[in-house]
Image (cartoon, rainbow, N blue to C red):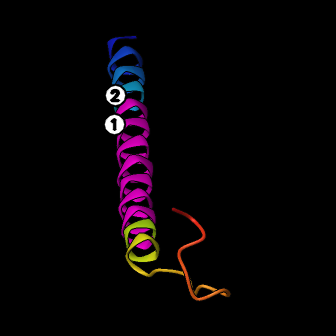
């Protein structure tokens, strides 16, 4: 009886650890994608679009 309780407890602990690890890995991936998107947006902001009329049409 005690062995089955200990085994169930270890199994539950292992599942909790695995769940926490999976969440951490997904969060890290999302943070990485966010950083890449921010860098891409900053790159696009630094490039001025060509003006068709020879003057600033956005100003």
The answer for how far apart the CA atoms under marks 1 and 2 are is 6 Å
Instruction: Tell me where the magenta segment starts and ends, as one range.
Output: 14-40
Answer above or below: position of 13 versus 17.
Answer: above
Badge 2 is on which residue?
Answer: 13
Q: Nearer the viewer, residue 48 or 54?
A: 54
Q: Which residue extends farthest top?
A: 1
Kindly identify which residue carries mark 1: 17
Question: Where does residue 40 sit, x and y in percent of width and height?
Answer: 44, 72
Q: Residue at x 55, y 81 (%)?
A: 55
Q: Nearer the viewer, mark 1 or mark 2?
A: 1
Residue 53 at x, y percent in the picture: 66, 86
Q: How many marks?
A: 2
Residue at position x 35%, y 20% in the image:
9
Q: Which mark is residue 1?
A: none
State whether the magenta stretch is mostly helix, strand or loop.
helix
In the image, is residue 27 part of the stretch drawn in magenta? yes
Say which quarter of the image contains residue 16: top left
The residue lying toward the viewer, choosing from 22 and 6, is: 22
Residue at 43% over, 37% down: 19
Who's the residue at 37% across and 68% down the image? Answer: 42
**Residue 11 magenta-highlighted:** no
Callout 1 touching callout 2 (CB < 8 Å): yes
Most foreground residue, 15 or 43: 43
Q: Secondary structure at mark 1?
A: helix
Q: Under tag 2, what secondary structure?
A: helix
Image x and y of residue 25, in percent = 38, 53
Counting other residues with Cα less than 10 Å from the Cα at mark 1, is it few (<14), some (14-19), or many (20 or more)? few
Q: x, y (%) of residue 1?
A: 40, 11
Q: In the image shown, does 11 or 59 lie closer to the viewer?
A: 59
């Amino acid at each position: 009886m005690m062995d089955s309780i200990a085994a169930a407890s270890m199994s539950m602990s292992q599942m909790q650890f695995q769940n926490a690890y999976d969440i951490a890995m997904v969060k890290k991936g999302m943070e990485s994608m966010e950083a890449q998107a921010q860098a891409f947006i900053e790159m696009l902001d630094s490039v001025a679009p060509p003006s068709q009329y020879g003057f600033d049409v956005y100003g």
